[in-house]
Image: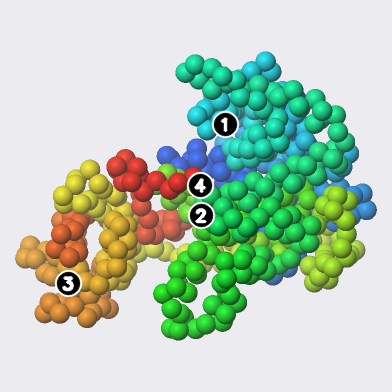
Amino acid sequence: MKYEQTTQTRHNQMLNLFLNGYTDMVAHMDAYCQKGLKEAAPLAFTKWYYTAIAADTLLSPANIVGQDLNSQDEGKEYLYTLRLSPEGQELKESDFTLLTYSVAEHPFVEDLRRITDFCIPDCKMDENLFFLEEDRPILLNKLAHESEFYLEYLTRLAWRLGLFVYMPAIHTKKVQRAPYCDAFFDQTNEEILKMAAEAACELASERFSISMDLDHGIATPSFFKECLTSPIETDQIFIQFYKQVDIDIEEIWKTQPADLTEDDKAIISSFLFTGIMIDKWFIFPMSAFFGMIRPISFTPIQYFNLVNNLSALLIMEHNIGAELFTPPSYYSLTPLGKALWGDNGIEDEKYKMPEKLPYEEILEALERETEINRFEQVFYMGPEKDILTIQVSMKEDPDFWKTIEIATTTPLDEFCRDLAAAFAVDEVTDYLLSVPDENQFPVDYTPQGSKRSVNKTTEKTLEDLYLDKGSVFSLTFEKTNQILLEVTDIFPGDPFILYPRIKRQSSKVTEIEKVDEIF
């Protein structure tokens, strides 16, 4: 049976702060991104749900709803999820479901039943033993969370718990509900949840080990179990994780940028990926799916950045998890988590919600804060100067191309180095930019420090070049790599779009750049 669309009426106004902010930005994105942005909305909403609406406060929707519904007294954790409107309807017509997580009733346990029952008498799966694409919408319509990642996570955990059995078949992969399911679901919810949590810690360890090529004994299931039962600030998870590979990141954090070694820089560059992994495979599931911990991020969601970054990832067909999975500032055990793992009583007082703060007063303050943030965002976006649409391709391979949009105010050296990065030209120290002047005579530019006696890109912008619609110019790296550029349009910028951006790219580029789904 599908989850009922239930919402406490008093919470609608707060929940719509997300729906209005997100959909208002989505409306300005390219048409071919709309479907992907709609499908990303449930995960984006959950990210918002655990984020402070007012900066540097504890006023996240999760904390506000928990206090309003007295979850501490009842031993329950409450979570709203976003249910998407049917295909063909506007995203703004979506609604919300209030989920209750407790030992007595738990959506994750019920959803494990649903996906195993779906395999009676059997069902086909793909080569990775996940549900087929045509079956996923049917299942998602019945599950607590309407996101592909939730179904993937449930499936991975069901396999790990032994709830599926593989059936030998020719030219296809068939799966059945395991006979063990009867005994498994005959257990109490508490027993099932503890077993599932143990398996979740094993899964987190597995994903870390595979994606980061870790030696045995690093990021073990017991490491994640300790993080679950004894919550700490997220920085401490980083510190403890890197200590296991003999790296003192606290010392690196204290080091001035000019004093960083190449090894230090390589370690710092790994922080982003490590953060994605920590959130995606540990914090996010343990909060949104299990309801055992409640995270909080103290920096409010900026819809301008969120939606623009998601659009860019969708255009390039990259994994949107890079934008949606970011570690929080802190997390604590929920009432359910305490019921299962005990209350160690060491939660920092500064992370506890103030008592006796009326919901109506909180909502009024948040609406004022949201309005101020919206005004500041529009003010800082300001009117954009002219934007150039440039078709960029490799001279030796015309099928390797991108269409970019970039402001004429962009510094010339930044423009050249960004193109080098976009076309995988590493460690650029020199280049030659050749642009026709008003008489179609080529004018050459090189970076500061180049030995060539030509114009320098220093303190110049694209606006300083003689570029018009139809202009063709080139950028050469180390003689062998030459990029051809053609200005196909010049137009006033849209203040809701983040420039520079890639508007389109060839299928060949997409295939070469495709980011592995390993995280």
The CA distance from mark 2 to mark 4 is 11 Å
State if disc 4 and disc 3 touch (CB < 8 Å).
no
- The disc placed on residue 445 is 3
Look at mark 4 in the image and give the residue it sits on: 518
Give the image quarter of residue 220: bottom right
**In the image, what residue occupies the spot 84% across and 40% down?**
191
Which element type, helix, strand or loop, lies under badge 1?
A: loop
- The disc placed on residue 130 is 1
Q: In the picture provided, is 224 more to the left or to the right than 342? A: left
Q: Nearer the viewer, mark 1 or mark 2?
A: 2
The CA distance from mark 1 to mark 2 is 24 Å
Which element type, helix, strand or loop, lies under badge 3?
A: strand
N-term-proximal mark, 1 vs 3: 1
- Which of the two residues, 152 or 141, is positioned nearer the viewer here? 152
Which element type, helix, strand or loop, lies under badge 4?
A: loop
State if disc 4 and disc 1 touch (CB < 8 Å).
no
